[in-house]
Amino acid sequence: MNLGLLGAGLVMGISAVGSAIGIGIAGQAVIGAWKKCYIANKPSPATLLVFGGAPLTQTFYGFILGLLFMKPAAAANPDNGSLYLGMGLAAGFAIAFSAIAQGKAGAAGADATGETGKGFANYMMIVGICETVAIFAMVLSMISLG
């Protein structure tokens, strides 16, 4: 068994699990914010959907890292399987926790925007900072593979 190929699959899977959790957290807040708007007979901002969908990008990062970079490296160097497995686990969890944190930040942003109608850009900056962790994990892992 090539452990490196397992690592390539795990980075994708773990990243996707983090995205799903983050989307679930933020999505609940988006729906709650919309509900508050409906109750108050205020327009429900469609921009809140951005908060709910933001953690999805981490699945793409796991896909890019796993299939486009780790899988070819692991297939070409099966003797480094343990290294690639460890890298896949570490990067996968870093990306997943980034998505979960992003979902929590997005939930707070959705609630605040829905209630006040203000601050969308400020809240998105925090959501973007959470995203940066996943990008760093992906890029630094790609550099390590090189």
Image (tube, rainbow, N blue to C red):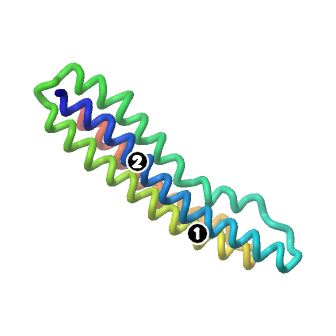
Helix, strand or loop at label 2? It is helix
Q: CA distance from mark 1 to mark 2?
A: 19 Å
Q: Residue at x 23, y 21 (%)?
A: 75
**Residue located 18% across and 28% down the image:** 2
Q: Position of residue 95 (x, y in %)?
A: 38, 51
Q: Which residue is mark 1?
A: 107
Quadrant of the image occupied by residue 54:
bottom right
Q: Does 68 sit above or below residue 36? A: above
Q: Is residue 80 above or below residue 89?
A: above
Residue sitting nearer the eye, 47 or 22: 22
Q: Residue at x 25, y 25 (%)?
A: 73
The residue indicated by pointer 2 is 15
Vertical placement of residue 10 versus 69, above or below:
below
Q: Count numbered badges in the picture.
A: 2
> Which mark sits nearer the N-terminus, 1 or 2?
2
Q: Is residue 40 left or right of residue 139?
A: right
Mark 2: which amino acid? Ser
Q: Position of residue 47 (x, y in %)?
A: 73, 59
State the residue in front, 127 or 22.
Answer: 22
Location of the N terminus by quadrant is top left
* Secondary structure type for disc 1: helix
